[in-house]
Amino acid sequence: MPAVQEIATILGINLGICIASFVILWAIGCALKDVTFVDAWWALGLAFMAVTTFFQADGADARMQLLLALACVWGLRLGLYILWRWRSHGPDRRYVKMLSRAQETKGWSFPVASWRLVFMFQAPILWVVSMPVQLGQLSATPAAIGTLGWIGAGLVVFGILFESLADFQLVRFKANKANEGKVLDAGLWRYTRHPNYFGDLCVWFGLWAIAAETGLIGVASIVGPLLLLLMFVKYSGGPSYEKRLTYQRPGYAEYIARTSSLIPWPPKKAAPEVV
C-alpha cells in the first residue's frame, strides 16, 4: 500500500487540477453567455482524472493501463456526444431558465449566477466521483488483474455499450419530426426511463471493482459510484425534468407509472378498467 503522503499528494494535485479546469470553463461560459457545455466536461473531466493520476502514480502497470483505457473510452464517447448535442440543439433550457431566474430575482450578474449555481460545487463532486480511477492506480499489488477486476471490466464495457445504444435510440427518435411531443418508450427506453444513467452507473461500479482488488484503499473508492448514484436518484437527471415533462408531454405520467426509473425491468401492465 502506498504511503499516506503519496496518496494525499496525488489526490491534492488532482483536486487542484479539477478546480482550475472549472474556473477556466466558467470564464469560457461567461464569454459565451452559455454554460451548457459543462455537461460534456463531466465525462471528459472524469476521464482526465484517470490521465492525471496515470502520470503521477506508480501502481501495477496492467491495472493502471486498464483503468486509463476504459475511463478514456467512456469519457471521450460520452463527452463528444454531449458536445455534439450542444452544438446541434443549442443551450440547455434548464440552465437558461435557472440562470435567468437568478438574475431576475436575486440581481446577480451572469458570471455570479453561473459560478454560484453551476460551477462552484462541481469540482469537488467530480473529484470524489472519479475516486475509482484515482485510488485504483496507486497500489503496486496485486500486479495482475484478478477475477473481480475482469468482472468489473466486463461491467464497464457493458455499460458503455448500453448507454451508447440508448443515446442512439434517442437521437434517432428525435430526428423523426413525427415524434415531436411524443414519449420514447421503445428499445431500452421501454425497460428504464434512464438507460443512459444506468449505463453510467455500470461503468463506475465496474471501475470500482477493478480498483477494489488493490485492497482497502481501492475499496474506499466506492464513495465515487455511491455519490453518482445519489445524484442520479435525488438531485440531477430524472428529478430535475420528469416533473416538468409530466405536465408538458401527454402520456409521460403513464410512462412513469409503468416504467422502471433506473434498473431495466419489464414494464408494468396497465390496470384493467373498472366497468
Image (cartoon, rainbow, N blue to C red):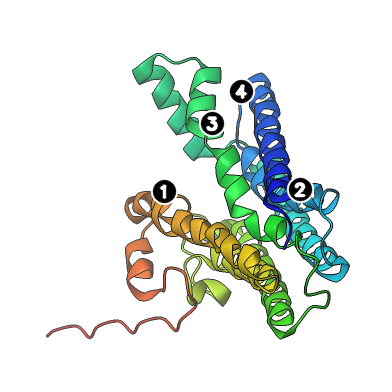
Q: Amino acid at mark 4?
A: Lys
Tag on residue 48?
Answer: 2
Residue, disc 4: 33
Q: Give the image location of residue 164, x and y in percent.
A: 69, 66
Q: Earlier along the polypeptide chain: callout 3 or callout 4?
A: 4
Amino acid type of disc 2?
A: Phe
Up/down of 263 relative to 61, above or below = below
Q: Which residue is tagged 1? A: 240
Number of residues whose C-alpha sits closer than 10 Å to that of mark 4, classed few (under 14), some (14–19) or many (20 or more):
some
Name the residue nearer the viewer: 109 or 12: 12
What amino acid is labelled 1 in the image? Ser
Q: CA distance from mark 1 to mark 4?
A: 22 Å
Label 3, label 4: how far apart the Cα atoms are: 17 Å
- Distance of label 2 from label 1 (alpha carbons): 27 Å
Residue in front for this viewpoint, 156 or 221? 221
Crowding near the residue tagged with mark 1, few <14, some 14–19, many ≥20 C-alpha atoms within 10 Å: few
Q: Residues within 10 Å of mark 3 (few under 14, many from 20)?
A: some
Residue at point 71%, 59% (across, down) = 133
Q: Where is 175 relative to 117, above or below?
A: below
Q: Secondary structure at mark 2?
A: helix
Q: Position of residue 134 (x, y in %)?
A: 71, 55
**Image x and y of residue 123, in percent:** 60, 38
